[in-house]
Image (cartoon, helix red, strand yellow):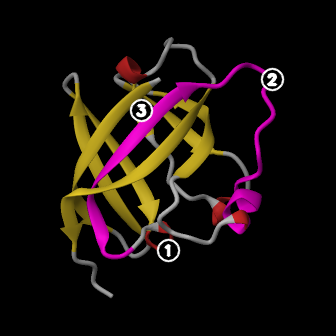
Amino acid sequence: MVEVALMDPSKTTDNKLRWQAVVEGVNFKLYVPKWRVPRPWPTRILVRISDVPAGAQVRDQAATAASSNSLERPICGIVERVHEHTQTVRFAPQGDPRDWEMGEPYIPYSLLASPSVQAVRIEVEWDRSAGTWFDEG
């Protein structure tokens, strides 16, 4: 398992917030839908990336979300390899895109257990110790 602190929520879109960090010279950015971020928005998030054993059963994210409606709970999900790039691998969450609690991360190779990993588990924890970011709504 690898843990990275992502900071600088430097970008918002109509629907998502972005946190980023430079990991061994490579930008790692993670987008989270605004509806899924507790308010006030935290300035920093902790992202844990761990291996997923081949053939592992994965809980449905929608069922997980229904079990706890608190936005303060961490985001946990499995993302699957979609496309390789020069310095990163693009992954996509499982399930219906309307239910995704995170965007499609481009994960630097240095954060992966092996360059050929097909799926990883991502956990996002809200870290308010660095302060909050005032949202627009």
Position above or below: 108 against 17: above
Task: Please state which of residues 124 and 120 is positioned toward the viewer in this rendering.
Answer: 124
Residue 52 is covered by the magenta coloring: yes
Q: Position of residue 118 (x, y in %)?
A: 63, 23
Q: Residue flagged by tag 2: what amino acid is it? A: Gly
Instruction: Find disc 3 in the rendering and name its residue.
Output: 107
Q: Position of residue 128 (x, y in %)?
A: 27, 59
* Disc nearer the start of the sequence (2/3): 2
Please, what secondary structure does the residue beneath circle 2 have? loop
Instruction: Find disc 2 in the rendering and name its residue.
Output: 55
Position above or below: 51 against 3: above
Name which residue lies at 36% across and 18% down.
110
Q: Position of residue 90 (x, y in %)?
A: 49, 35
Residue 58 placement, left or right of 99? right
Residue 65 is covered by the magenta coloring: yes
Give the distance between the C-alpha atoms of the residues marked 2 and 3, in whole angstroms.
22 Å
Mark nearest the camera among 2 and 3 is 2
Q: Residue flagged by tag 1: what amino acid is it? A: Trp
Residue 96 placement, left or right of 118? right
Q: Position of residue 71 (x, y in %)?
A: 51, 69
The magenta stretch is 39-66
Name which residue lies at 50% across and 43% down.
123
How many numbered discs, if any?
3
Residue 41 placement, left or right of 92? left
Asked if disc 1 and disc 2 are in contact, CB closer than 8 Å, the reply is: no
Instruction: Find disc 1 in the rendering and name its residue.
Output: 35
Name which residue lies at 41% across and 25% down.
2
Give the class, few, some or many, for how many residues have Cα within 10 Å of label 2's Cα (few <14, many ≥20): few
What is the quadrant of residue 127 in the picture?
Answer: bottom left
